[in-house]
Image (tube, helix red, strand yellow):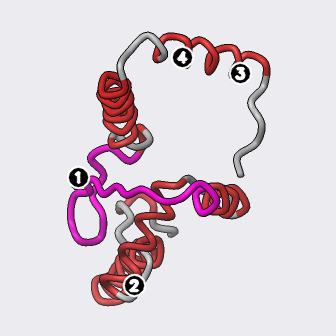
Amino acid sequence: MPAPLNRKEQAIADQIRALLAQLPPDGVTRVLADVEEHLYAEDDQGPAFSRGIAGPLGKLEHPLKTKVDEHTHALFLRQCAMQNTDASNELRNCVYAIVHGKSYDQMVIEKLSHAVQRTEALTKLIGSFGAPESEVR
């Protein structure tokens, strides 16, 4: 169950209910669907730092969304807060774990680890990348 509304939120909820009471039931349904669509459209962008980011398998540009019951939603958000992450990151991790057998975060770490190993191997093969003036005499 979600936390109770504060005074400001309750006042806004009351105003919304009063406005919706002026519409027939099908009008209420259309208005709420339109509002929900606009809210999801904003969520699809994700945090500014993740827009257009290239993941280990390509650019992250295809949104996924679903609906869950209120109790599950509250527990999921609590779990995200305990892990100090956001919902979109956790959903992405779940999808990647189901599809690839590894979370997105794990795949990113592996990609970075491989890049470091590749750089170290190149350094062993061809020597230091430093400029001549950086060499000790």
The amino acid type found where label 3 is placed reads: Gln
Crowding at dot 2, Cα within 10 Å, few <14 / some 14-19 / many 20+, comes out as few
Say the numbered circle drawn on residue 33: none
In the image, which disc is placed on residue 16?
4
Reading the image, the residue beneath label 2 is 117
Inter-mark Cα distance, 4 to 1: 34 Å
For the residues marked 2 and 4, what is the alpha-carbon distance in whole angstroms? 57 Å
Disc 4 marks a residue whose amino acid type is Ile
* Main secondary structure found in the magenta portion: loop
Question: Compared with residue 113, is residue 38 higher up or lower down, i.e. above or below?
Answer: above
Q: Mark 2, mark 4: which one is toward the viewer? A: 4
Query: Is 47 situated left or right of 10 in this image?
Result: left
Label located before the other in sequence (4 or 1): 4
Point out residue 135 in the picture as x, y percentages from the top left corner: 45, 67
What SS does tag 4 mark?
helix
List the residue tagged with mark 1. Answer: 61
In primary-sequence order, the first of circles 2 and 4 is: 4
Is 45 above or below relative to 31?
Answer: below
Q: Earlier in the sequence, mark 3 or mark 2?
A: 3
Mark in the foreground, 4 or 1: 4
Task: Give the label, 3 or 1, closer to the camera.
Answer: 3
Residue extent of the magenta highlight: 50-73
* Residue occupied by mark 3: 10
Q: Residue at x 69, y 22 (%)?
A: 9
